Amino acid sequence: MKIYILIPVYNEELNLTELYNNLIKVLPEYSKHFVFVDDHSSDNSISLIHQLFKNEAYHLITKEKNVGPGDSFNLGFKWINNHSTSNDDLIVTMEADNTSDYNILHNMVVISQLGYDLVLASPYAQGGGFDKTSFFRKTLSHIANGFLRYSFNIKVLTLSSFYRVYKITLLKKIIEKYKEPIEEQGFICMLEILIKSINSFASIIEVPMLLCSERRKGKSKMKVLKTSLRYLKFMILKKF
């Protein structure tokens, strides 16, 4: 079994050294392969990835223009699908900005091996929460999640978090059914593939996580107004 750790990158030079230091420590008992997709960074992200991960198993996909995290995840998923050699393989997706809680990753992998196709790290699950996140963003997130869960009949609490563990067999089912794992280019991509997972009859479970925004160096890449409008359009127009 191999664990592919898929991370979209866009101008994360300030966060990559800490990311590396955290990633080489997690899951020491498993074979890991890091997959980075750079969304046309204008800083030193690409060369720093090569420098930091030169002694690790890794692959870096680069793009000629900035498109969005959805496009990055789609490229990464397809690369992994083409290179995975075992139906026991897992895919971990996470942010490059160190806001994910690395301490729960081992438990997420173990839970996946108990028979779950998709394990979600959730700040909304009992025991999870937000650290240093503004009241406005938390309120907006709660309202948006409520509308989206109602619109698409989704039972899980966390819809947009990057931090997840997928079984490779689930990814193959999604590709067989939909051709493209993800079509949305922006941050709404995580909702799209979640719905595709549900429609592919995935068994899904949530694990509580503390979202630590204070670990991030630099600003979040998500534009609240633009993303909110994209969610609204998705909710009105998207059919599955």
Image: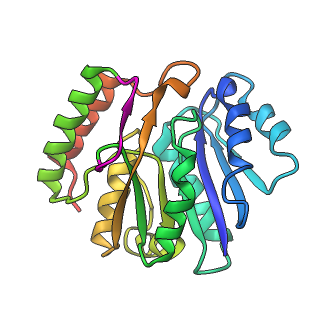
User: Which of the two residues, 31 or 78, is positioned nearer the viewer here?
Assistant: 31
User: Which of the two residues, 226 or 162, is positioned nearer the viewer here?
Assistant: 162
Q: Quadrant of the C terminus?
A: bottom left
Where on the picture, by quarter, is residue 80? bottom right
Q: Tally the marks.
A: 0
Point out residue 238 in the picture as x, y percentages from the top left corner.
22, 52
User: Which of the two residues, 105 or 203, is positioned nearer the viewer here?
Assistant: 105
Query: Overall secondary structure of the magenta stretch?
Result: loop
Q: Quadrant of the N terminus?
A: bottom right
Magenta residue check for 126? yes
Point out residue 26 in the picture as x, y percentages from the top left corner.
67, 53
Magenta residue check for 55? no
Q: Identify which residue is drawn at 28% across, 70% down.
A: 199
Q: Determine whether, in the image, residue 8 is placed left or right of residue 209.
A: right
User: Which of the two residues, 95 or 122, is positioned nearer the viewer here?
Assistant: 122
Compared to residue 57, the image places residue 23 above or below, namely above
